[in-house]
Image (cartoon, rainbow, N blue to C red):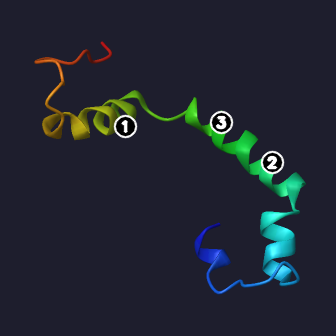
Amino acid sequence: MALAMVGVRFKSDKRDQYLQHGGWFVKVALWLLFTVVAFFLPVGLVNAYGAGPWHACPLAPAKTYTWP
């Protein structure tokens, strides 16, 4: 949504009216879709995503738990 708002300077712009102040049905529908889809992601993908940034965190535990 941020990239779609590049160049908008006034509230009267069509993109601002729909994306920033309107379009609630689409926003809620996408939010529900992303929430439901998150439960169907493979466990390996979630573990890989969660284990990725640990090497850069000084407070990270020595060994992270992985799903059996």
Which residue is denoted by mark 2 in the rendering? 29
Q: x and y percent of residue 16 in the render?
A: 80, 75
Q: CA distance from mark 1 to mark 3?
A: 16 Å
> Is the residue under label 1 in contact with that under label 2 (CB below 8 Å)?
no
Callout 2: SS: helix
Q: CA distance from mark 2 to mark 1?
A: 24 Å
Marks 3 and 2, the one that precedes in the sequence = 2
Around disc 3, counting alpha carbons within 10 Å, would you say few (fewer than 14), some (14 to 19), or many (20 or more)? few
The residue drawn where x is 14% and y is 17% is 63
Marks 2 and 1, the one that precedes in the sequence = 2
Which residue is denoted by mark 3 in the rendering? 35
Q: x and y percent of residue 61 in the render?
A: 16, 18
Using the rendered view, name the quadrant where residue 48 is placed.
top left
Q: Is residue 44 or residue 64 the one in the foreground?
A: 64
Q: Quadrant of the C terminus?
A: top left
The residue drawn where x is 80% and y is 83% is 10
Marks 1 and 3, the one that precedes in the sequence = 3
Around disc 2, counting alpha carbons within 10 Å, would you say few (fewer than 14), some (14 to 19), or many (20 or more)? few
Using the rendered view, name the quadrant where residue 58 is placed.
top left
Q: Amino acid at mark 1?
A: Leu
Which residue is denoted by mark 1 in the rendering? 45
